Amino acid sequence: MKRLLTLWLACLSLSLQAQDQQAQIAARATAISAKLIEWRRHLHEHPELSNREVKTAAYIADHLKKLGIEVQTGVAKTGVVGLLKGGKPGPVVALRADMDALPVKERVDIPFKSIATADYLGQTVPVMHACGHDSHVAILMATAEVLASMKKDIPGTVKFIFQPAEEGPPGDEEGGAPLMVKEGVMDNPKVDAVFGLHISSSVEAGSIRYKAGATMASSDWFTIAIKGKQAHGSTPWNSVDPIVTGTQIIEGLQTIVSRQSNIVEAPVVITVGKFHSGVRSNIIPEEALLEGTIRTLDSRMQKDVHERIRKTAVKIAESAGAVATVTIDNKTLVTFNDSALVKKMIPSLQKAAGEGRTGTMNWVTGAEDFSFYGTKAPAFFFYLGGMPKGNDPQKAPGHHTPDFYIDDSELYVGVKAFCNIVFDYAKLSVK
């Protein structure tokens, strides 16, 4: 009886400690909300393109150093990595935020509107945080501050990964998560689990959405170079028209989705985004170039779609007397959430947002290079809502558009989620 009483008291003590810890996280995350919003708006007003996040990186590094966190800069060109060693033994948990903006001109009339410009592949372009990476950075900066204030209670080590070039490095440069991984961000110390979040303009502010398994699509970029025969526009019978051949190839590619792929099994998207050919209206050119993207959520289907694209383009070109050369470049993998990890961490998300505001989502055909971290450790990537309450999700301005907008009043929910994850994962990993 005495032994049972001792065990009961020990369990009660642990339960009370957990409740106190959760209350501390909630209080500190709420208290830092004003600073979080200030950081986010500063970053929004001063965006930088992929692999050019120099001032953003300095802003982050300065903050982490003031917190007494060990800081490494220049990772994968402009990345910043912070290491916080807790006061108790435990696992290494990585938390990731992406830093880069996009070549988009902001149309939203807000006090901190971006009017920045930058060089992009030799052209001067407007720059905007049109995907919410400013929010991701601010959330992780706030998370670092909260966890630093609780350092003695943290079981294990927290690695803060501030990643450049998630949107893709310019030209032929290396960058993003693949380069972070290549340079050892998941090692020294070796990461046991990695977590990330993404703001969503179509999910109500403060709500969290997640999915186990395949969550976001792989992203492959393709080019189809078509070689025909040039002729005068008045005598098309003397040509092998690469423009007509290109349009037939585009139509053929769409049948891969509509007639050849089992989209009940997993979604497939093939989009041609560029068509370059010709220099003058009365000349049928010799060459045409198609460029596009492929999105799949299943590795087997990905391989199958690649083969069908090659076959479709080559055979259609042959039927016209032209030659098609297909090149496919894999940019990101399928973002895959480890099912066991998701199951364990759902309560952490519910503590942050509330059970009523935490739920599942469908898979997304957008892509994320967070997927590369998942090749090194179990990974979990979830969504945090940023849509003003009462708005219609169907009318919410999309990501990567000039009208992209988020309500930043509940970004602190992301801080609570990350902090709860750090403590809860440590408890669950020792069981």
Image: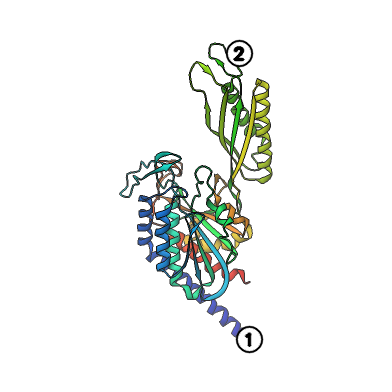
- Sequence-wise first label, 2 or 1: 1
Quarter of the image where the N terminus is located: bottom right
- Three-letter amino acid code at disc 1? Arg
- Looking at the picture, how far across and down is residue 302, in whole percent? 65, 42
Which x, y percent locates residue 413?
44, 60
- Residue 367 x/y as whole percent: 55, 46
Q: Is residue 313 above or below residue 320?
A: below
Q: Which residue is drawn at 37% across and 58% down?
A: 39
Residue sitting at the far bottom: 2
Residue at point 59%, 85% (across, down): 6
- Residue 387 or 180: which is nearer the viewer? 180
Disc 2 packing (10 Å; few <14; some 14–19; many ≥20): few
Looking at the picture, tell me which residue is in the foreground, 229 or 421: 229
Q: Position of residue 155 (x, y in %)?
A: 54, 73
Mark 2–mark 1 distance (CA, rounded to whole Å): 96 Å
Label 2 element class: helix
In the image, which disc is placed on residue 3? 1
Q: Is residue 387 left or right of residue 176?
A: left
Residue 103 occupies quadrant:
top left
Q: Identify the element where label 1 is drawn.
A: helix
Task: Determine which of the numbered discs, if any, sits on residue 238 in the image.
Answer: 2
Q: Which amino acid does label 2 sit on?
A: Asn
